[in-house]
Amino acid sequence: MSAAPSSPSVGGPLSKRTRGAILHLSIFACSVMLVLAAARWYDRSDRLLRLERTEYQAGIPDISAGTYLGSRGTSLAYNAFAYDWDHVVDAARKADVLFLGNSRAVYGFRPQYFQPWLDKIGLRGFNMAFFGGGGFAPLYVIRKFDLHPKMVVINDDGFFLLRDTAWGKAARTEGPWRAFKDYYSKTARWLVQKRLHQIVPPLRAFTGRRSLVVYRSIRDGAPIFAFGESEGKPMTRLPPDEPSRAMRELVDQSLPIVRAGSKKFLEEMDRRGILVVLTAIQDNGEFAGYYLAKALNEENRRIYVHAMLPNLMGQAGSHMDAWSSKRLMDDLMPKILALPQVQALARKPAGTRP
């Protein structure tokens, strides 16, 4: 009887096929590491980001009792204000002055710089600007919660187009229960991931761009940039006195839509006895919003305060940093406070209704 074939001994020499597989796997792993390292280098060197830490890094503040997660890859402020989660509408309801506009207004109208000026005349301000938004969301909130501020200060950068956003539409149409789950589940997921990835490095930090993480103050709407872009690039451009021919044509095409939106918004403010102060802050771009606001205001004859300043600094593209916000408020707020209509508001009893 022939002997049975012997089985390979444990720990014996590896077969040629096994050695080849291990070699290929090692080469693949090294290639992946090289790609990830290159991606991380690119992410850090990109001039629009220059992020030296991940959004989960230890030292990034937690959400406190006085803040909420306003944005992390998507704007949660629409959801928060549609349903008053975390009582974010309370301070807006009590405010004398609401600062409105898009993301440039979030960065530009910082309460730590406008409030000291308002304190001089005994008024309280609140930043109710929305990322990516215009006048639709503020008008919706003002109507839904029956807000009666004494004044609104608007960065009129396409504000009167009154366009809805995907974030705002989703928040309003998904219903209170789904909106509740969406808002608080994203907040909880952020807090869990923040702690997890202080221990386990996040793959996304190597393979993709990191999320802008912004908390918002419940008390005054101030943006708190927990993690995000820091461009540090001078915003040196100012709009010429006259727009180019192409820009003039664009403004002429947009005016009918903006005219209808402004009529709707301004009539609501007038009905509520709310003073409207318009401005347009520096965006370092094509200034379409500025020229559109200028043309519209020639028709509406509302209060318009010039706010273009040279040599501001960009925190993220056309969004100014804190130093520039202070410069802007130190220039804009005295002009607003000097208006006779605003001086009259300072003497108007609190809680007065039209």
Image (tube, rainbow, N blue to C red):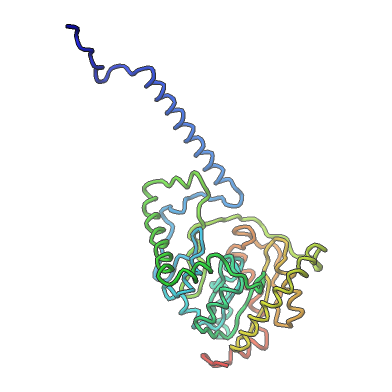
Compared to residue 252, the image places residue 236 above or below, namely above
Decide if residue 66 is on the left or right side of residue 109.
Answer: left
Q: Is residue 147 left or right of residue 307?
A: left
Q: Could you say which quadrant of the image residue 15 lies in? A: top left
Coordinates of residue 318 in the picture (x, y in percent): 64, 60
* Identity of the residue furthest to the top in this view: 1
How far from the left and from the top, in percent, is residue 198?
38, 50
Q: Quadrant of the N terminus?
A: top left
Relative to 301, does residue 13 appear above or below in the rendering? above
**Where on the picture, by quarter, is residue 128?**
bottom right
**Total number of numbered discs in the rendering:** 0
Q: Residue at x 31, y 16 (%)?
A: 13
| Above or below: residue 345 compared with residue 131 | below
Decide which of 61, 101 is in the foreground and name it: 101
Judged from this view, the residue extending furthest toward the left is 1
Using the image, determine if residue 344 lies above or below residue 21: below
Q: Quadrant of the C terminus?
A: bottom right
| Residue at (41, 62) in percent of width and height | 187
Q: Is residue 321 left or right of residue 1?
A: right
Picture coordinates of residue 214, whole percent (x, y): 50, 62
Image point 53% across, 69% down: which residue?
169
| Residue drawn where x is 49% and y is 32% of the image | 31
Q: x and y percent of residue 52 in the render?
A: 51, 49
